[in-house]
């Protein structure tokens, strides 16, 4: 593990590149789906899920966004393993974030089923489930489950190191992700209270979690090797 760190406490170029992927990947994903959602014809980002942007003639843009962002998150997870080793969470946090990256990448290869009125004329709740849609949902699940767990695990590590600000932030980010994800799911099931803002809740869940990854990557890029492992 020490081969990616210089003896003077600075990170090697290879490790800094891996960590930088944790800055670029999540931000890229957020920016692309926000632009796509705001400009796509007949698409309502307040109601409809991010995954629906993969449908249609321009769906390849969001599909590529899933894949590239996912690969960058996987690269960050690899770098995080070197940074955290051998302390608490040095296995589980990179593994969980790696699963998030795998989930994003897999979701890009399988298009979700139409739902919530997009494309226009489709049922609000899918009446037919395809293999592609099922696989997309399965790959997407780690994003909303594994990432909050990673927040909680590394929050425990930060608390142990006396970095209480990061500990509290990590726990709150994990909780916020779970709450908004549940509210989005209720909305997508056409609950009258939440359905008009289901897309907002899902986007909030993603933005909270992916911003946390970005800030975590920046934190470790700026933290000397010995301080990160202590």
Image: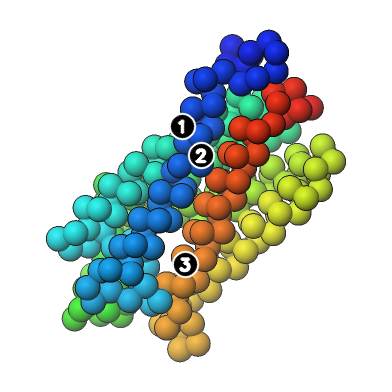
Q: Position of residue 121 (x, y in %)?
A: 19, 81
Depth order, front residue of 2/139: 2
How many residues crowd mark 1 within 10 Å: few (<14), some (14–19), many (20+)? many
Q: Position of residue 213 (x, y in %)?
A: 56, 46
Q: CA distance from mark 1 to mark 3?
A: 25 Å
Q: Residue furthest bottom?
A: 192
How many tags in the picture? 3
How many residues crowd mark 3 within 10 Å: few (<14), some (14–19), many (20+)? many
* Residue located at (43% from left, 56% from top): 30
Which of the 4 quarters of the picture holds residue 35?
bottom left
In the figure, is residue 102 to the left or right of 135? right
User: Mark 2 — residue?
Assistant: 22
Depth order, front residue of 98/40: 40
Q: Which mark is residue 202?
A: 3
Q: Is residue 15 above or below residue 32?
A: above
Dot in front, 2 or 1:
2
* Residue located at (40% from left, 42% from top): 70
Q: Are marks 2 and 1 in contact (CB under 8 Å)?
A: yes
Q: Secondary structure at mark 1?
A: helix
In the figure, is residue 70 to the left or right of 128? right
Considering the image in quadrants, where does the N terminus appear? Answer: top right
Considering the image in quadrants, where does the C terminus appear? Answer: top right
User: Mark 1 — residue?
Assistant: 75
Q: Are marks 1 and 3 in contact (CB under 8 Å)?
A: no
Q: Secondary structure at mark 3?
A: helix
Depth order, front residue of 212/123: 212
Sooner in the amino-acid sequence: mark 1 or mark 3: 1
* Residue located at (33% from left, 76% from top): 44
Q: Is residue 7 above or below residue 69?
A: above
């Amino acid at each position: 593990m020490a081969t990616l760190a210089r003896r003077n406490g600075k990170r090697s170029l290879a490790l800094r590149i891996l960590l930088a992927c944790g800055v670029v990947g999540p931000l890229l994903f957020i920016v692309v789906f926000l632009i796509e959602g705001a400009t796509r014809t007949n698409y309502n980002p307040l109601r409809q899920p991010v995954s629906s942007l993969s449908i249609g003639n321009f769906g390849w843009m969001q599909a590529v966004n899933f894949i590239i962002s996912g690969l960058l998150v996987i690269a960050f997870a690899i770098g995080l393993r070197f940074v955290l080793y051998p302390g608490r969470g040095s296995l589980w946090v990179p593994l969980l974030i790696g699963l998030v990256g795998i989930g994003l990448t897999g979701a890009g290869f399988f298009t979700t089923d139409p739902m919530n009125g997009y494309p226009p004329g489709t049922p609000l709740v899918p009446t037919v489930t395809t293999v592609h849609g099922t696989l997309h949902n399965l790959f997407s699940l780690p994003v909303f489950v594994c990432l909050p767990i990673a927040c909680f695990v590394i929050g425990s590590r930060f608390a142990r190191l006396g970095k209480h600000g990061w500990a509290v932030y990590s726990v709150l980010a994990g909780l916020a992700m779970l709450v908004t994800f549940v509210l989005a799911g209720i909305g997508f099931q056409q609950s009258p209270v939440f359905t008009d803002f289901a897309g907002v809740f899902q986007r909030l869940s993603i933005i909270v979690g992916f911003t946390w990854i970005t800030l975590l990557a920046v934190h470790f890029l700026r933290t000397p090797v010995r301080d990160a492992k202590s």
